[in-house]
Amino acid sequence: MSTEFKTPEQDRASPADAPTIRRIVRMGDPVLLRVAEPIIDPTTPEIRGLAEAMAATMHAAPGVGLAAPQIGLSSRIIVFIVPEHRATGHPGDRAEALNVLINPEITPLDDGVVLGWEGCLSIPGLKGEVPRHARIGYRGLDLDGRLVEREATGFHARVVQHEVDHLNGILYPSRMTDLTKLGYNAEIDAALLAEQEPT
Ligand code: NI
């Protein structure tokens, strides 16, 4: 315990209400296998605080998406960003902006399925090649209770499907159709690089 006192300036520099970084739950914890509960009122200070803690935890990890069950809360809320280099150029991607989505729902827009590499903060160190719908529509509520409705392709579509799966108790290995494409980051990256090298 510290006996130091802070000046008012120091106190403002490190506000007591800064969002706390939470411990990320890892695969094997039953909370990750549970269907999360809908959020009744997305506009409460508690939900806003939860979203801020989730965003801080995601950024610190670092990661690009996080669902509430990953910090041990069985509630239907996700946060994610579409990094600039993974945006498609569609304005709906809102590159680098923080997205908070409450009670999200996904509708595939056609039969197209694409394979892509995914990692998960609850399965650290590993990645796998996962089939996902190529084009989706999704809807949910923001922290002001307003309806958010978007269409997404590419990485944007993938991250939303990955995070909404968390709300339904599904981890990406369960979506994989070829488990030979599951491995440690360094080994998979080396193998992919070797494949690309001209002989
Ligand atoms: Ni994940």
Image (cartoon, helix red, strand yellow):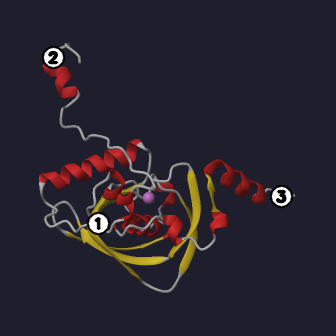
Residue at the spot 22% in from the left edge and 27% down from the top edge: 13
- Residue 140 shows in this picture: yes
The quadrant of the rendering that contains the C terminus is bottom right
Look at the numbered discs 1 and 3 and tell me whether their residues touch, using CB distance below 8 Å: no
Tell me residue 64's x, y (percent): 43, 54
| Mark 2 residue crowding within 10 angstroms, few (<14) / some (14–19) / many (20+) | few
Residue at the spot 19% in from the left edge and 65% down from the top edge: 39
- Whichever of callouts 1 and 3 sits on the residue coming sooner in the sequence is 1
What is the CA distance from the residue labelled 1 to the residue labelled 2? 43 Å
The quadrant of the rendering that contains the N terminus is top left
Ligand 1 in which quarter: bottom left
What is the CA distance from the residue labelled 2 to the residue labelled 3? 62 Å
| Horizontal relation, residue 70 to residue 10: left or right | right
Q: Nearer the viewer, residue 89 or 53?
A: 53
Instruction: Judge whether 146 appears above or below 79 on screen.
Output: below
Q: Secondary structure at mark 3?
A: loop
Q: Nearer the viewer, mark 2 or mark 3?
A: 2
Identified by mark 1, the residue type is Ala
What is the CA distance from the residue labelled 1 to the residue labelled 3? 47 Å
In this figure, which residue is indicated by the disc labeled 1?
36
| Horizontal relation, residue 68 to residue 197: left or right | left
Identified by mark 3, the residue type is Pro
In this figure, which residue is indicated by the disc labeled 2?
7
Tell me residue 113's x, y (percent): 54, 79
| Mark 1 residue crowding within 10 angstroms, few (<14) / some (14–19) / many (20+) | many
In this figure, which residue is indicated by the disc labeled 3?
198
- Whichever of callouts 2 and 3 sits on the residue coming sooner in the sequence is 2
